[in-house]
Amino acid sequence: MTLGIIRVLTTQDTLLLEEHGRLLAEEYGLQTVSRCIPDQPHGIFDASSEAQALPKIIALGQAYEREGCQAIFLSCAADPGLDELRRAISLPVISAGSACARLAANLKLPVAVIGIGDQAPAPFRRLLGEDVLYARPEGVTQTTHLLTPEGRASALACAKTLYEQGAVVIAFSCTGLSTIGLAEQIRKTIGCVAIDAVSTSGMFIVEWLGKRTVA
């Protein structure tokens, strides 16, 4: 089967566009197709950019359904338009935020959330509590900032601070952290549990849909 991936960062860089699909293929053997919504060069990073993205997300999901995809992965940890998309199409839709937050909640360990917004996105606050420990890397307010050497270093430093504040588990509330491979860096240099939103979504996709998902 084919999994349609919705990327909310507009890019003409094919490697960047297909990175989350590559990660899912490598880890789970999933067959994917990736497309980005238009005119969002900095992705989704606040209420305004999310509102602009919603109709585009729904339109891309509907296009995937028409083209024969069997499931949709909304690759954004804020779960933008998730309920609306599920109402608009008949395909199963898994989103990065709720998948990551649910796994973190199920571990029953002290958890912190790292992301790019002013606070943890709604699915994390809903599943982990409104007072969940949260931090944003210094100097990072958009997902594109993570693609710079400074952004990568800041993200790792932020994770270390959360660990020092008592977090045993660090959950990613931005899929850009998956793009830069932060989970492996955290495990190697800090030694705590890192929950990658893209990888976790792949686990739920395989468990939910079964062997049909595997190429």
Image (spheres, helix red, strand yellow):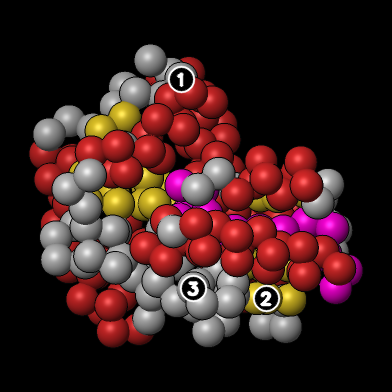
**Of labels 1 and 3, the one closer to you:** 3
Reply above or below: 203 against 150.
above
Q: Nearer the viewer, mark 2 or mark 1?
A: 2
Secondary structure under the numbered disc 1 in the rendered image: loop
Element type at mark 3: loop
Q: As rendered, which of 92 and 38 lies closer to the eye?
A: 38
CB atoms at circles 2 and 1 under 8 Å apart?
Answer: no
Residue 201 is situated, as x and y percent measured from the top left of the image, at 51, 43
Q: Residues within 10 Å of mark 1 (few under 14, many from 20)?
A: some
Earlier in the chain: of badge 3 and badge 2, it is 2
| Residue in the foreground of this view, choosing between 59 and 149 | 149
Q: Residues within 10 Å of mark 2 (few under 14, many from 20)?
A: many
**Could you tell which of marks 2 and 1 lies nearer the N-terminus?**
1
User: Any mark on residue 82, and which?
Assistant: none
Disc number placed over residue 140 in the picture, else none = 3
Which residue is depicted at the point 21% across and 66% down? 40
* Residue 111 visible from this viewpoint: no
Q: Is residue 43 above or below residue 209?
A: below
Identify the residue under disc 2.
134
The type of residue carrying mark 1 is Gly
Residue 180, compared with residue 134, is above or below; it is above
Q: Is residue 170 magenta?
A: yes
In the drawing, what numbered circle is on residue 29? 1
Q: Position of residue 119 (x, y in %)?
A: 57, 81
Residue at point 34%, 70% (across, down): 44
Q: Label 2's element?
A: strand
**Among the 4 quarters of the image, the one containing residue 68:** top left
Query: In x, y percent, where is residue 73?
Result: 37, 45
Label pair 1/3, CB-CB below 8 angstroms: no
> Magenta segment range?
165-179
**What crowding class fits label 3: few (fewer than 14 Cα within 10 Å), some (14-19), or many (20 or more)?**
some
Whether residue 45 is visible here, answered yes or no, is yes
